[in-house]
Image (cartoon, rainbow, N blue to C red):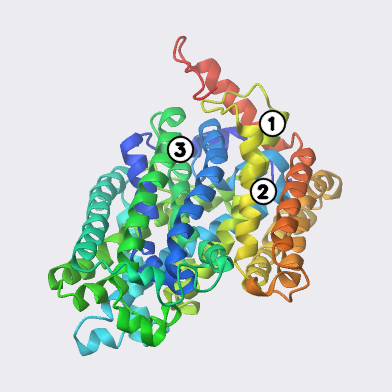
Amino acid sequence: MSTTKTTGAEQGSHSNYRRSLGTIALTATGLGSIIGSGWLFGAERAAAIAGPAAILAWVIGAAVALTIALTYTELGSMFPKAGGMVRYGQYSHGSLAGYLAAWANWIAIVSVIPGEATASVQYMSSWDFGWAQALYDGKELTGTGVGLASILLIFYFFLNWFAISLFAKTNTAITVFKVVVPILTASALMMAHFDTSNITDHGGFTPNGWSSVFTAVAVSGIVWAYNGFQSPLNLAGEARNPGKSLPKAVIWSILIALVIYVALQVAFLMAVPGDKLDVSGWAQLGYNSPLADLAMAWGLNWLALLLYADAFVSPSGTGMIYAATTSRMIQGVQENGHLPGIFGKVDKKTGVPRPALVLNLVIAFLFLAVFRGWGSLAEIVSVATVISYITGPVAVMSLRRLAPDLKRPVKLRAMPYIAPVAMVFGSLVLYWGRWPLTGKVILIMAVGLPVWAWYEIGKPLTQGRKPWAQLRPHLKAGAWMVAYLLVMATVSYAGGKEFGGRGYLPAGWDIAVVAVIGLAFYFWGVRSSWRNPSLVQVEAEMNAAEEAQPAGEGKEPVGA
């Protein structure tokens, strides 16, 4: 079976990585991923959907991300390998579930790269130059805009080509700038204009109802933004002390970003001119460069210029990070047995998986050609992200059942309660994404299945092997995930009209039904896990590494 690679091959590839990233560098990576294009556009999109209640959407989004992230911090510290999040489903459930989770995760992350380039060019379109305004037509990038965004993609690519140490130094410096500018922006807008009547007038705090708050979490870029928490996990193979640094980096990056995003949302809501809301309301604001346009409206020309500059720095920093992390994800997928061997190669001199980097650049170009607007990319990314999230809660408790003796540098006593709650949260956000978007993204998940079928069925048959007996337990263990996606698509279609459905499920009851579905599939997923070849192999690797460790270097589990 393609799911069993030689231990020596995998260890060899990972030996080329440089374990040079500490807690600060990893936190900068997580925070730099979270504060990308989302802060430039997220406040306006969230306000357009939920009005002033968008403030709560950011808090709910952070709670969801933090709950799910806690499950992944245990997994990331257990398996400090590059491309971490594409591996965990493979370890707990074998080939089918592992591939679906990896595919969803990769789609969600690789599409962010062209999204960041698109954001930079879209902000440029507000410059007072004819050539700049011709880059964006109000809905999507023009041909010239796509060309400029393509140049940015190549820039992200080359920043990652040479060495992980160059990436770390560049990213930490960029992240400092990315944190300072949003804080300065929120403060300046609040001091320039703080109209509290915007909260009470123009439809009140929830002009589109409470359901709009949940939809804003799913599709306005909030999930897109917080998804950056996984970047440190995907660089786990390059962490100096993953047991201590990974959980700190993940948790701190989410909490710091929450404060910044709430401040920006409040500043945006209070800075919008009341006469503009009298005419169009929150839903029809239509700024091309939201924060910069507001800065210009209140005479903050210096801030507008700073924002135009940061429109390159923030998305470029995030695009650079995701170019790095997705290349590690591709290497993880290859080591799971579902891509050609060349994509598992890591350059010995630089510690960079260069073939994987090239593949992601090609895919980023394809996404840029098809999805030319930040909003359309944000919707696709957000829903695909949520699908990838459901693996963590199930995998973390599955591995506690299957491999209780594996070393866990991070082990929370409350995980048996956190994991099912995380599964429910993920299911709710997927439902809030609204039909037909949920159906479309679930269909994208099916598009990747022919690749899995080739490596698990087609390739063995061409080699004269009969894969069916070995494949059967993988299919049985992965059935829960296939069924989950089909059931969630059905519920989304039949659900409440406020979430795009046909209205067969009454308001309130639909939320309860989705929560029950999430719990049911959580327990099914945990019970269907099995000691598959990938888990046996990684256990052998970890035990060998433990035996080779000098006496006295073991660390007590965090939170045990």
Residue for badge 1: 536
Q: Amino acid at mark 1?
A: Val
In front of the other: 409 or 225: 225
Residue 368 in the image, given as x and y percentages of width and height: 44, 74
The mark that comes first in sequence, 3 or 2, is 2
Residue 112 in the image, given as x and y percentages of width and height: 45, 63
Q: Secondary structure at mark 3?
A: helix
Residue for badge 3: 237
Residue 278 in the image, given as x and y percentages of width and height: 37, 84
Residue at coordinates 55% horizontally, 33% vertically from top-left?
Answer: 74
Q: Nearer the viewer, mark 1 or mark 2?
A: 2
Q: Quadrant of residue 311?
A: bottom left
Q: Is residue 16 left or right of residue 174?
A: right
Residue at coordinates 82% horizontally, 44% vertically from top-left?
Answer: 473
Q: Amino acid at mark 3?
A: Gly
Q: Quadrant of residue 508?
A: bottom right
Residue at coordinates 50% horizontally, 68% vertically from top-left?
Answer: 206
In front of the other: 331 or 436: 436
Q: Which quarter of the rendered picture does the C terminus lie within?
A: top right
Residue at coordinates 47% horizontally, 45% vertically from top-left?
Answer: 234
* Cβ atoms at labels 3 and 2 below 8 Å apart: no
Marks 1 and 2, how far apart at CA: 15 Å
Q: Secondary structure at mark 1?
A: helix
In front of the other: 12 or 511: 511
Q: Amino acid at mark 2?
A: Gly
In front of the other: 207 or 247: 207
Residue for badge 2: 98
Q: Is residue 119 visible?
A: yes
Q: Secondary structure at mark 2?
A: helix
Q: Is residue 138 visible?
A: no
